[in-house]
Image (tube, rainbow, N blue to C red):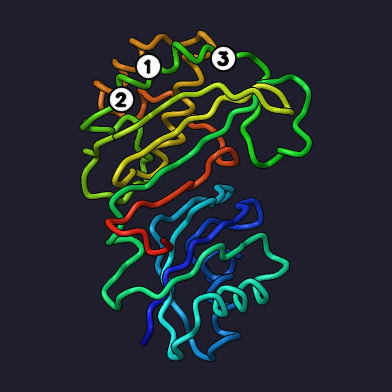
Amino acid sequence: MPRFALKVEYHGAPFVGWQRQKEHVSVQGTIESALAKLEPGPHTIAAAGRTDAGVHGLGQVAHCDMTRDWDPFRLSEALNYHLKPNPIAIVACSRVDDDWHARFSALERQYLFRILTRRAPATHDKGQVWQVSNPLNVQEMQRAADMLLGKHDFTTFRSTICQALSPIKTLDELRVEQVDGFAGTEVHFHVRARSFLHNQVRSFVGTLERVGAGSWTPEDVRDALGAKERAACGPVCPPQGLYLAGVVYSQDPFA
């Protein structure tokens, strides 16, 4: 059965998240339904990461097994036709080895989080950013973020329903950037690691926002990390500003 890698872009608002659920609309389930229109029978796809409800995908990667040896371009075009009008797009498709796996072959996941800092309600970016009305101190947020880099026990920044076997992870990048756009000033968080705990990125951003607003100090973040207990975490930010931006493999399947 030929295996294909899919690079998937989606707007997370209409979905309960990536993972298939029987009575709710998910990104995975919607793509599997489109595949069934191309080749009858049940389809199961695997993804590099499972995003929560409301979280978006810019560079999600999944793989599917087909019975027919499709031309990758034809497969992506056919899928995009059957995915309409859902806000999901297959932006790249390629044939991969039978033992290649979207999740287990991945070396790194990259996330982007966007905060819009303005008082007027968001219009064009509504549902795609977390909006706060107060300006944020990017320098202080970066100083706090630097304290989270490296290998740590991230229990404080882990959801109580996280199913990971260990809270110990290595954070490779947590970069805070101010971006001045047409809609106003945004603060972007660029986050990289091999893998993440459930709600880890949103816990980071919600806590760092408190630093940027002046309610926390960078030292408070260091102490929260050292506490190794969920109660020490700052507020968990909403999902709509979070994007799975990319996945890194030893060889880019879409190159």
Q: Choose top left, top right, bottom left or bottom right for residue 114.
A: top right
Q: Under tag 3, what secondary structure?
A: loop
Return the residue at label 1.
Answer: 144
> Which residue does the numbered mark 2 point to in the structure image?
148
The N terminus, quarter of image: bottom left
Q: Quadrant of residue 88?
A: bottom right
Give the structural element (helix, strand or loop) at label 2. loop
Q: Residues within 10 Å of mark 1 (few under 14, many from 20)?
A: many
Q: Nearer the viewer, residue 212 or 74?
A: 74
Q: Residues within 10 Å of mark 2 (few under 14, many from 20)?
A: some
Above or below for 193 versus 40:
above
What's under tag 1, amino acid-wise? Answer: Ala
Place of residue 96 in the rendered image (x, y in percent of width and height, measured from the top left): 35, 73
Reply above or below: 149 against 196: above
Q: Earlier in the sequence, mark 1 or mark 3?
A: 3
Q: Quadrant of residue 149?
A: top left
The disc placed on residue 136 is 3
Name the spot of residue 241 as percent of width and height, x first: 58, 38
